[in-house]
């Protein structure tokens, strides 16, 4: 028989660096999850993503056990990495802080495809390009579907 689900917890942690300190400890402690057990499992599964932001969806069961699913890094984090920036623009409509190419946007869209609400690569690319625009990052060149 399937376990009864009591709730979900969404967190964004750095890969391989989860510890019981806030924000992880209080979020999991309120649900009754063994915090150290989660940290050990998370760190073991994210050794290859050391220091990168990794969203995680934790399913909490009635017997206080849990499962978790790792997601791909958020698009803004990947865009900042691609543009070699530390943060986006404070005024994205006026101040442009960096540039990315359509090839980089396509790479990010392919990586995020499983987590995006898009059916085609072109629509996923336009979503990532929209995120870039809202961060003050310009996308160089013409969109591949406009050629």
Image: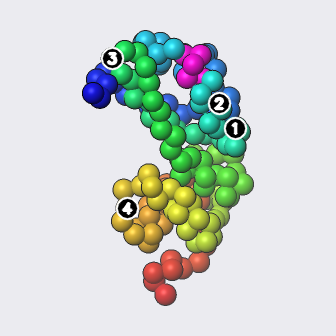
Query: Which mark is first along the chain, 3 or 1?
Result: 1
> Mark 3 or mark 2: which is in front?
3
- Judging depth in this view, the residue of 55 and 102 nearest the camera is 55
Distance from disc 2 to disc 1, alpha carbons, whole Å, reads: 6 Å
User: How crowded is the residue under tag 3: few (<14 C-alpha within 10 Å), some, or many (20+)?
Assistant: few
Instruction: Examine the rendered structure and indicate whether residue 107 appears above or below residue 136.
Output: below
Q: Residue at horizontal 27%, vertical 27%?
A: 1
Question: Which x, y percent locates residue 13?
Answer: 58, 32
> Mark 4 or mark 1: which is in front?
1
Q: Circles 3 and 2: CB distance less than 8 Å?
A: no
Query: Which mark is first along the chain, 4 or 3?
Result: 3
The disc label shown at residue 47, or none:
1
> Mark 3 or mark 4: which is in front?
3
Distance from disc 3 to disc 4, alpha carbons, whole Å, reads: 34 Å
Range of the magenta residues?
35-39
Q: Residue at horizontal 61%, vertical 71%?
A: 103
**Quadrant of the rendered image containing residue 95:** bottom right
**Quadrant of the rendered image containing residue 15:** top right
Would residue 21 be found to the left or right of residue 29 on screen?
A: right
The disc label shown at residue 43, or none:
2
Residue with the mark numbered 3: 62
Question: Which x, y percent locates residue 23?
Answer: 54, 21
């Amino acid at each position: 028989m399937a376990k009864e689900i009591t709730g979900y917890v969404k967190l964004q942690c750095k890969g391989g660096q989860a510890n019981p300190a806030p924000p992880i400890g209080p979020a999991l402690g309120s649900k009754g999850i063994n915090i150290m057990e989660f940290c050990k499992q998370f760190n073991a599964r994210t050794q290859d993503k050391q220091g990168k932001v990794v969203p995680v969806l934790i399913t909490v069961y009635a017997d206080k056990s849990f499962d978790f699913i790792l997601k791909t890094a958020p698009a803004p984090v990947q865009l900042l990495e691609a543009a070699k920036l530390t943060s986006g623009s404070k005024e994205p409509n006026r101040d442009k802080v960096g540039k990315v190419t359509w090839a980089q946007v396509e790479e990010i869209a392919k990586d995020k495809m499983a987590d995006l609400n898009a059916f085609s690569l072109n629509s996923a690319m336009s979503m990532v390009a929209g995120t870039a625009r809202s961060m003050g990052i310009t996308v160089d060149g013409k969109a591949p579907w406009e050629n």
